[in-house]
Amino acid sequence: MLDSHKIYNILKASFSPEQAEVLTNVVSEAFLDFSRLVTKQEFSELVESQRRINEALNQLTVRVNELAEAQKQTEQRLNELAEAQRQTEIRLNELAEIQKNTEKNIEKRFNDITEVQRKADERFNALNETVQKLIQELVEMRLQFSAEIKDIRLQFGEEIKDIRQQLGGLAMAVGYGIEDKVMPYFFDLAKKDYAIQLERVDRRNYTYSDGRYDEINIFAEGIKGGKKHIIVAECKAQPSKKDADRFMRW
């Protein structure tokens, strides 16, 4: 006995419901036509063949179901991969947007730094120009000041020289004045302190063998016990210890 419903279910797994129904009817009619033409033995053989066909159909059904399940899992995996691909594309788009914004920020920062550097260069150049002008002005002022100092030195040099000459003359005049006032008292001083009878008191210039020269402010000559004695004195308007030491070495 042909199981039309089972054949229909088997065919529906691979064909549309309408196609499976048409094929089931064709197979059923062909089976009926064939059953009318065969003998009982042949029919038994056909039944056995049908049984084997049904077993094969059952195995085919299991295989088709397995393939359908595998197809389902494959489609599910493909859907998962498609979703992962979509998420990847979204992430890549986000990264591309981040990179784009980063590049914009870097470019803006670079432009800002370039502008700051340009302004710094302008300020440095302006400052350098100002410094160069100041250096030039200082050099000119120094030259002018040096020239003025030179003029002042030339102007006052003669005056200072004249003043020194005048002071030297004044010092000489004061020294000579002191010597002139002291000399008359040497006669009594020599006689009283040294028992020397002075014959003369005056100034002397003494030249050494090596060419050095000294002026003796007071040079006195006298007699004591029949022998000639000399008294030498130095006159200072403001005597110091250094003068006394130098006189004692002399």
Image: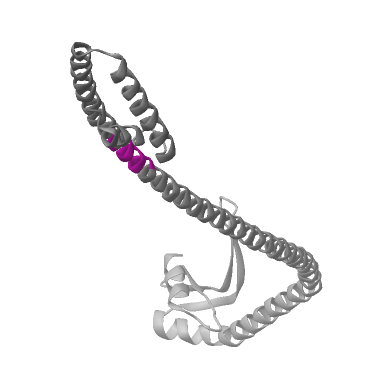
Image point (32%, 24%), residue name? 32
Whether residue 88 is situated above or below residue 55 in the rendered picture: below
Q: Is residue 226 visible?
A: no
Total of numbered circles in the picture?
0
Left/right placement of residue 236 relative to residue 172 reads left
Q: What percent of the width, then of the height, locates residue 138? A: 74, 67
Whether residue 165 is situated above or below residue 125 in the rendered picture: below
Please say whether residue 235 is one of the residues in the magenta stretch.
Answer: no
Could you say which is closer to the camera, residue 14 or residue 8? 8
Please say whether residue 75 is one of the residues in the magenta stretch.
Answer: yes
Colouring style: one colour
Image point (49%, 81%), residue name? 239
Q: What percent of the width, then of the height, locates residue 209? A: 56, 51
Left/right placement of residue 131 relative to residue 31 reads right
Q: Is residue 242 visible?
A: yes
Image point (78%, 76%), residue name? 159
Q: What percent of the width, then of the height, locates residue 26? A: 39, 27
**Which residues, given as a range, are shown in magenta?**
69-78
Could you say which is closer to the camera, residue 197 or residue 116? 116
Q: What percent of the width, then of the height, locates residue 131? A: 71, 65
Location of residue 172 (image quadrant): bottom right
Could you say which is closer to the camera, residue 113 or residue 215? 113
Location of residue 72 (image quadrant): top left
Q: Main secondary structure of the magenta part?
A: helix
Q: Quadrant of the N terminus?
A: top left
